[in-house]
Amino acid sequence: MSEIAKKIRDRSLFNEPLSKYTSWKVGGPADTFFAPDNRDELSQFLKSNHDKPITWLGNGTNVLFRDGGIRGSVISTKKSLNNIKMEAENSCRVEAGASCMDLALFAEKNKLGPAAFFSGIPGSIGGALVMNAGSFGHETWDFVESLEVIDQTGTIHNLNPKDFKFSYRDVKFPFPLWFLSCLMQFSESGITTKSELKDYRDQRLKRQPLSEDTCGSVFKNPKKEHAGDLIERAGLKGHKIGGCSISTKHANFIVNEGGATSKNIEDLIKYVQKAVRKKHNIDLEAEVRILGED
């Protein structure tokens, strides 16, 4: 057995509770849970498991794993593939496991921008690429120049944004893949300042339940509307199911108050959708990914 194969075997966890790895702190077990140290381990794991279902996990935000868990393997890049480095002028290479906040801080230090908005995205760069995450009027894919991706056989590909179809909180892939890194190109005149980061942080602290267990925004904003406003106007702030509730601070957040199950949260999501449809005749689309078995 090779050294890499031994490391993969030793670090593979079986029947691992996913509640340990998500910001909502809920979720059933993964058949196999693996967190690679580097690209070689990731590639080897995929080559050895290419015939099994693979679920990718970044920082654990914007995802709801059902109580029955995930069949196949869950691969977490949160503690690896997290480097950020300068490339050409006004550009940097960001690995998928880096947090969006880390990118915002890197941009401030290296006079890149506009990038303060990344501080408003709770997840990793990989997760932000998956859903074209955004905040404060900007979106992730606005700044993507090129990408490194890996497929389910462990093969690495270099792609361009034109190989994808992306829109508001939605990205269509050319084939099953996960992001390894992306080259981000910023404006020649743009910078990110400490005062911007502080201002964005203050705004979020004032308007969002940052100290509580949430996934970030639960619903996409309908055209010309804000999901939180629609939910609030439907009288749903504070509404509870089991151990979770609609935040009284921002209605597009669902809070695990302690002891919530994934089913509680999914039931509350469906309840909100039904109530908003009845009140406003608008269908709210979930931004959070709901995965796994009941």
Image (tube, rainbow, N blue to C red):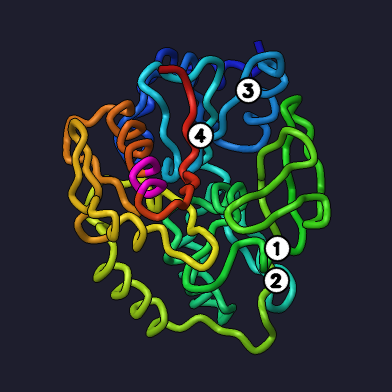
Q: Which residue is mark 3?
A: 4
Q: Position of residue 109 (x, y in %)?
A: 50, 77
Residue shown at 27% from the left, 68% from the top: 207
Residue shown at 45% from the left, 59% from the top: 121
Q: Specify the amino acid type for callout 1.
A: Val
Q: Specify the amino acid type for callout 2.
A: Gln
Q: Kindly report which numbered mark, 3 or 2, lies closer to the viewer in this rendering.
A: 2
Whichever of callouts 2 and 4 sits on the residue coming sooner in the sequence is 4
Pointer 2 and pointer 4: residues touching (CB < 8 Å)?
no
Separation of disc 2 and disc 4 at Cα? Answer: 26 Å
Relative to 68, 245 lies left or right: left
Q: Quadrant of residue 84?
A: bottom right
Q: Quadrant of residue 36?
A: top right
Q: Report the span colored magenta.
A: 273-278
On residue 185, the disc is 2
Whichever of callouts 1 and 4 sits on the residue coming sooner in the sequence is 4
Regarding mark 1 in the picture, which secondary structure is present there?
Answer: strand
